[in-house]
Amino acid sequence: MKSPLLLPSAILLILLLLTAPLPAATTTGHPGSVAVLLGLDSVRNELKLTKSQCDQLDKIRSNFKADAHLITTRPPATQVEKSAANSTVKSLINRYNEKAVAVLTPQQHARLVQIERQILGGLMLFQPDEQKLLGLSSSQIAALGQIRSNGEAFASRVTNSFEKGNLTLQERLATLRNYRIKQSAKCLQVLSPAQRKAFRSLQGTTLKRA
């Protein structure tokens, strides 16, 4: 199985948007921010985006970051506020994902999904569309749900530690990144050999770094 690609700056931001607790799978079928992912030069080159498309995506990403900043300016203090913030972030990601995907051609979008599988690895298996595509059983889906639940608890503990000043931002991000790599591997272990082979095939050709 291919190891998830590590593209530090953008991936850290994507992971930060998938932290404590992790939002549920997005309604757009993309786990994380498409607008951020499409800001990577390597992804843009792979998709052969036109200047017009890049200009549109730059504007979408800029607006997304501005709106996200408004949400994260004041960290939520209570569990109720945290739940509300997570719901708001999820809605924000969904809204901007739809805008970003609308800029792409069907062929570009299909390739983008392959790239997401490469970058996120087994974390893509949290998406219902991926589970259906690979024909996962109810027991496999339940196992993934438990892995996700454990991840939410871990991310919550890390965030609480960060908010108490016990971790720096970089330490928080590094801890979450390392956990996600291990979590991805656990997700892939849920698959049968045939399913892992199919998932590897669905990743397409390896993304070239810019």
Image (cartoon, rainbow, N blue to C red):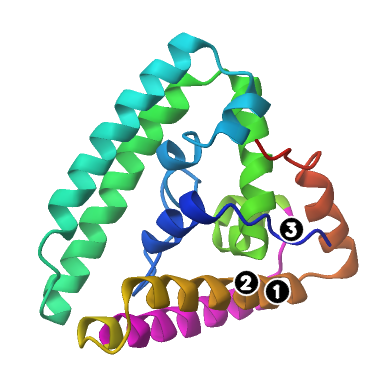
The tally of labels here is 3
- Which element type, helix, strand or loop, lies under badge 1? helix
Q: Residues within 10 Å of mark 1 (few under 14, many from 20)?
A: some
Residue lying at 52% horizontally and 37% vertically, measured from the top left:
40
- Which element type, helix, strand or loop, lies under badge 2? helix
Q: Quadrant of residue 122?
A: bottom right
Q: Which image quarter is the N terminus in?
A: bottom right
Q: CA distance from mark 3 to mark 2?
A: 23 Å
Q: Given the image, on which type of amino acid does mark 2 rest? A: Ile
Q: Which residue, given by chain and number where applicable, does mark 2 sit on? A: 181
- Which element type, helix, strand or loop, lies under badge 3? loop
Residue lying at 41% horizontally and 77% vertically, measured from the top left:
171
Q: Are marks 2 and 1 in contact (CB under 8 Å)?
A: yes
Relative side of 113 to 31, left or right:
right
Relative side of 2 to 112, left or right:
right
| Residue 8 seen anywhere in this rendered image of the structure | yes
Q: Which residue, given by chain and number where applicable, does mark 1 sit on? A: 185
**Magenta residues, as a range?**
134-160
